[in-house]
Image (cartoon, rainbow, N blue to C red):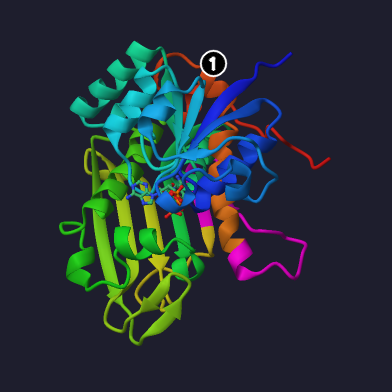
Amino acid sequence: MPRHYRVIQWATGSVGRESLKAIVMHPQLELAGVWVHSEEKRGRDAGELCGLPPTGVHATTSLEEVLACDADCVAYMPRLTDLDEVCALLRSGKNVICTPFLFYGEALPDAERRKVASACLEGGTSVHGTGIHPGFVGMVLPLAMSGLSRTIDHLRIEERADWTFYDSPRITFDNMRFGHPPEEAALEANAFARFNAEIFEQQIHMLSDALGAGIDEVTVEQDLCVAPETKQVRAGVLEAGTVSGQRYQWRGLCLGEPRIEIDALWTLGGFYPEHWPKPRDGWTVSIEGDPSLRTHFLSLASFARRDATIDEHVHASDIATAMQAVNSIPALCEAETGIRGSFELGPVRAGIGFRR
Ligand SMILES: NC(=O)c1ccc[n+]([C@@H]2O[C@H](COP(=O)([O-])OP(=O)(O)OC[C@H]3O[C@@H](n4cnc5c(N)ncnc54)[C@H](OP(=O)(O)O)[C@@H]3O)[C@@H](O)[C@H]2O)c1
């Protein structure tokens, strides 16, 4: 008989709602609680928050209530993170699966790593950050592909994403500062962009350690472009002259030579800069080596259904992000105490699986 795990959902945004729904449906998981940020959702039934029948579990805005709740794991998916909060959850004996951060412990600043590790030790718990990217595309997929390699010379991950239909205005405009003057979206000016950059760097360090790339430095270069005209997008109005394109190139160097690279090409409003490369939408992972390998990865609402809307297609990535996390919960709850990386949890597979 497989073990069952009691899980608390933390935040019910685009990703959190899908995670909540999956926790309710997953045969090995039982919903133990729901934390919400907004007052308006406080007290509402979890089922109502994710489009399912009533569950009898009601949302709270109180950290103390979550800490006091008997649960094996928290699925932590807020827009803004708080490391002290995560450490309190870990100390209270709850494992934490999360989508915003903590992707690779070895790459965290020393003080943060020690703080999280000691919370894990105190609570006898573990924590793992994952999602579609960062997570699956930048860590799980390259590692799986590398199983076909004799030797590797170079590894490159390209992400091409159009944010026009992304339904998280806060992340698009407030966090990433699309729709702001370029000087406000610059890495030096935007703490969230720096936080985000560190997460992608964590993936490079993780791959380097796992594959022996010997990366001794990771650099990041940012290229910002502005909208030539005003445009209505899913998250609001993108004004002419404000940021509509952000390119980030992370390079993992070994003695000055790039060995692992991530190139993220993000646009809003349909304006594509002439001077950028033009990969296919989605993610492309290329390994140059013996042999050379390439895969192009997409997550869509359907490959068969013609009437799937663009919003549904965009939302598919939120579902995939939530599911990579939810499907990791049983392995995480059984994992050794501490900050766990993707390759330490074994292959993650669908817990609900085929529709019945
Ligand atoms: N790894 C990946 O591949 C990946 C992919 C997509 C997103 N993410 C990350 O996953 C997280 C969730 O993404 P999302 O698209 O669901 O975001 P979202 O829809 O913008 O919001 C998530 C939720 O966070 C809560 N929230 C709002 N303001 C907050 C604040 N000031 N402090 C703390 N929480 C607040 C709200 O919860 P309630 O509605 O419950 O009140 C909100 O719905 C984000 O951190 C995002 O960066 C990761």
Residue 281: give x, y in percent of width and height. 53, 64
Q: Which residue appears at 24% of the width and 23% of the height?
A: 115
| The N terminus, quarter of image | top right
Residue 280: give x, y in percent of width and height. 53, 65
The verdict on residue 4 being magenta is no
Residue 346 visible in the current orientation: no
Magenta segment range? 283-312
- Tell me the kind of residue under disc 1: Glu
Residue 257 visible in the current orientation: yes
For mark 1, does the 10 Å Cα neighbourhood hold few (<14), some (14 to 19), or many (20 or more) residues? Answer: few
Tag count = 1
The local secondary structure at tag 1 comes to: helix
Q: Which residue appears at 44% of the width and 29% of the height?
A: 128
Whether residue 39 sits left or right of residue 295 in the image: it is: left
* Label 1, ligand 1: CB separation under 8 Å: no
User: Is 306 placed above or below 110 here?
Assistant: below
From the image, tell me which residue sits under label 1.
334
Q: Quadrant of residue 170?
A: bottom left
| The C terminus, quarter of image | top right
